[in-house]
Amino acid sequence: MAGFLDRAKEQAQSALQQGKQKVDDVQQQKAGGDLLKKLGAAYYAERRGSGSPQATQDALTALEAYVNTHGDAFLRH
């Protein structure tokens, strides 16, 4: 009986870890998407005359920093 409980506990811990990883992945996707959206909005505002090149550059810099830290997987979805 103890062996069964140990295996069940290991499976539950594994499922919990997989769930946590999925949540982390989704949060990273959202964060990357938000930065990409900010870059697009800054660029659009700049092109329409209501934004600045500095705002666009700041958004690009933030996105590049994120990609350097977390990768660019969010771009593929």
Image (tube, rainbow, N blue to C red):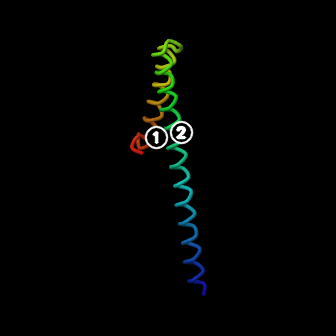
- Residue at 45% over, 16% down: 47
- Residue at 53% over, 39% down: 31
In the depicted structure, whether residue 4 falls above or below residue 22: below
CA neighbours of label 2 inside 10 A, class few (<14), some (14 to 19), many (20+): some
Which amino acid type is shown beneath numbered disc 1?
A: His
CA neighbours of label 1 inside 10 A, class few (<14), some (14 to 19), many (20+): few
- Residue at 47% over, 21% down: 44
Local secondary structure at mark 2: helix
- Please indicate whether residue 10 sits to the left or right of residue 71 in the image: right
Tag nearer the camera, 2 or 1: 2
Q: Which sits in the foreground, 73 or 38?
A: 38
Local secondary structure at mark 1: helix
- According to the image, label 1 marks what residue? 70
- Residue farthest toward the bottom in the current orientation of the protein: 1
- According to the image, label 2 marks what residue? 31
Q: Position of residue 14 (x, y in %)?
A: 53, 66
Q: Position of residue 7 (x, y in %)?
A: 54, 78
Q: Position of residue 33 (x, y in %)?
A: 49, 38
Which amino acid type is shown beneath numbered disc 2?
A: Ala
